[in-house]
C-alpha cells in the first residue's frame, strides 16, 4: 500500500493548469460527495474537470466553478430481474459509447472513478483508450463497478486501511487516502470530544442515512424509554426518521421525560455531530467517514441487505479500531439495546476512549490526499520525492 501522506508533493500553485481531468461517479450521495470534493480540489490546482454521472447527480455539481457536468445513460444490474438487467445493460452500453466519444474529443490527462454503475462507461472507456485512470472506493469492500476495472487502474484509493475484494495482484496499487467529507465536518477534527458528566445532559444523534432506517424508528425509541428515569431525564435526542414513521416515533416518546427533536432530514448535521456524545446510525461509508473525521463514538447497526454486506465490513473496521460498537440488526432488540445503552451512557471513560479511537482510525484532508494521488499518477511530483513506497503495514500518521 502506498502512503500518500509520505508523497512529498510541493508542486506549483496550479500544477494542473491547462489540464483536463475527468471525474466519474454514480448518482448517490455516498459516491457524489467524495467525487465533488476531489473535483473542487483539482480545480483549485488549475484543472478543468469534466464530471461524468447520471441524471440523479446534477444537483450535486450544479454551480461548482470549473466543473462541467455530463449526464450519461446508466442503469444498475445487480439485484434486478431479467428485464431490468437487459435494460440496465443497454443503458450502460449507450453511456459507454457517449463517454468514449467525449473522452476522445476532450483528451483528459486522467480519469478518476468513484464507483456506482454510472462510473462504468467512463472508466471502461479510459481503459480502452489508454488514458491513465484511478478509482476510489468509499466502503470497506471493493464495489462491483470498481471491481470491473480495478486490474487496469493505475491507482486504487481507499477510505479504509483494509478493503476486501481487492485482487492480490492489485494490492501494490492501493493508497489509503480516506473518504472526503463536507468541509464543516472536516473542521470538527480540530475540536475535542466533551464527554458527559455524571449528572449532566447526554446528547444522542440518531440517523439512518439519507432515507432513514425503519429499525431505528421501531426499536430505538422503546429502548430509550425503558432506561431508568434518572438517565431518561438527562437525554437530549435528535433523531432522523422517515416521514411516515415520525408520528409513531413521537407517540412512543410521549411522557418519557426525554427531550426529543424529530425530523425526516437533519440539515445541521455538523453542528449536531459536534455537540453529541454518541451517534447511533447505520454504517454507510459517509456516516463512518464523518464519525472518524469528527472523532465521535458510534453505535452502529449495519444494513443487513447491503450489497456484499459492505456496511458490516465498514462497521467492523471502526469497531476493531475501538471507535464504535457494532450490533447486528438481528440482535437489535429493545432488551439488548436498553442494557447496552444503560451501561455505555454512564461510562464517560469508554465514550472518550472510543472518540479518540474513531479520530485516529480516519484520514484527515482526504480530498487533498486524493488530488495529490492524481498529481503523483501523472508524474507531477518533484524529482526525488518518494513514489509507490510499499508500506502495506501502514505506520504512517492517520490525521
Image: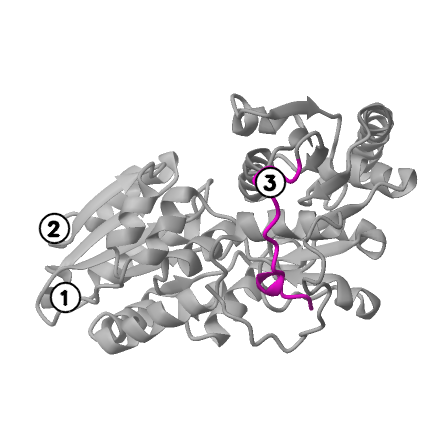
Residue tagged 1: 231
- The tag earlier along the polypeptide, 1 or 3, is 3
Q: Quadrant of the N terminus?
A: bottom right
Q: Is residue 110 left or right of residue 240?
A: right
Residue, x 68% and y 36% (percent of image)?
23
- Magenta span: predominant SS is loop
Decide if residue 53 is in sight here. Answer: no
Distance between the Cα atoms at labels 1 and 3?
Answer: 42 Å
Distance between the Cα atoms at labels 2 and 3?
Answer: 45 Å
Q: Is residue 214 found inside the magenta-colored segment of the image?
A: no
Residue, x 13% and y 69% (percent of image)?
197
Identify the image's colour scheme: rainbow, by chain, secondary structure or one colour.
one colour
Mark 1: few/some/many CA within 10 Å (<14, 14-19, 20+): many
| Numbered range of the magenta stretch | 1-16
Q: Nearer the viewer, mark 2 or mark 3?
A: 3
Q: Give the image location of residue 356, x and y in percent.
A: 35, 70
Q: Is residue 13 found inside the magenta-colored segment of the image?
A: yes
Q: Can you tell which quarter of the image residue 175 is in?
A: bottom right
Q: Is residue 368 above or below residue 328?
A: above
Front residue of 180 and 190: 190
Mark 2: few/some/many CA within 10 Å (<14, 14-19, 20+): few
Q: Give the image location of residue 207, x and y in percent.
A: 38, 49
Residue tagged 2: 255
Residue, x 42% and y 48% (percent of image)?
208
Residue tagged 3: 35
Front residue of 246 and 396: 396
Front residue of 47 and 180: 47
Q: Give the image location of residue 147, x and y in percent.
A: 78, 54
Q: Is residue 209 left or right of residue 111?
A: left
Q: Give the image location of residue 288, x and y in percent.
A: 47, 57
What number is the disc on residue 54? none
SS class, disc 2: loop
Amino acid at each position: 500500500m502506498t502512503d500518500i501522506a509520505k508523497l512529498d508533493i510541493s508542486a506549483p500553485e496550479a500544477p494542473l493548469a491547462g489540464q483536463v481531468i475527468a471525474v466519474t461517479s454514480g448518482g448517490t450521495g455516498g459516491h457524489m460527495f467524495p467525487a465533488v470534493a476531489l473535483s473542487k480540489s483539482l480545480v483549485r490546482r488549475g484543472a478543468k474537470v469534466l464530471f461524468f454521472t447520471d441524471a440523479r447527480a446534477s444537483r450535486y455539481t450544479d454551480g461548482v466553478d470549473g466543473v462541467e457536468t455530463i449526464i450519461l445513460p446508466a442503469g444498475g444490474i445487480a439485484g434486478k430481474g431479467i428485464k431490468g438487467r437487459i435494460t440496465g445493460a443497454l443503458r450502460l452500453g449507450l453511456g459507454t459509447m457517449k463517454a468514449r466519444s467525449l473522452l476522445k474529443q476532450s483528451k483528459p490527462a486522467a480519469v478518476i472513478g468513484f464507483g456506482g454503475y454510472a462510473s462504468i462507461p467512463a472508466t471502461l472507456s479510459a481503459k480502452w483508450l489508454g488514458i491513465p485512470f484511478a478509482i476510489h472506493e468509499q466502503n470497506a469492500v471493493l464495489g462491483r463497478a470498481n471491481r470491473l476495472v480495478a486490474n487496469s487502474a493505475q491507482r486504487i484509493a481507499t477510505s479504509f486501511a483494509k478493503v476486501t475484494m481487492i485482487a492480490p495482484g492489485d494490492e501494490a496499487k492501493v493508497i489509503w487516502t480516506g473518504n472526503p467529507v463536507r468541509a464543516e465536518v472536516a473542521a470538527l477534527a480540530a475540536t475535542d470530544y466533551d464527554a458527559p458528566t455524571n449528572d449532566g445532559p447526554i446528547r444522542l444523534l440518531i440517523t439512518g442515512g439519507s432515507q432513514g432506517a425503519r429499525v431505528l424508528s421501531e426499536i430505538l425509541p422503546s429502548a430509550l424509554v425503558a432506561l431508568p428515569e434518572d438517565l431518561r431525564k438527562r437525554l437530549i435526542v435528535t433523531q432522523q426518521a422517515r416521514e411516515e414513521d415520525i408520528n409513531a416515533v413521537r407517540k412512543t416518546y410521549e411522557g418519557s421525560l426525554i427531550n426529543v427533536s424529530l425530523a425526516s432530514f437533519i440539515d445541521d448535521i455538523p453542528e449536531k455531530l459536534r455537540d453529541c456524545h454518541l451517534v447511533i446510525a447505520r454504517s454507510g461509508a459517509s456516516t463512518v467517514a464523518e464519525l472518524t473525521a469528527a472523532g465521535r463514538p458510534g453505535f452502529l447497526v449495519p444494513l443487513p441487505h447491503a450489497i456484499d454486506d459492505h456496511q458490516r465490513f465498514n462497521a467492523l473496521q471502526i469497531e476493531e479500531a475501538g471507535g464504535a460498537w457494532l450490533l447486528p440488526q438481528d440482535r437489535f432488540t429493545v432488551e439488548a439495546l436498553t442494557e447496552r445503552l444503560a451501561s455505555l451512557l454512564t461510562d464517560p471513560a469508554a465514550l472518550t476512549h472510543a472518540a479518540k479511537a474513531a479520530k485516529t482510525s480516519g484520514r484527515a484532508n482526504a480530498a487533498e490526499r486524493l488530488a495529490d494521488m492524481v498529481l503523483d499518477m501523472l508524474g507531477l511530483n518533484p524529482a526525488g520525492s518518494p513514489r509507490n513506497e510499499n508500506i502495506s503495514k501502514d505506520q504512517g500518521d492517520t490525521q
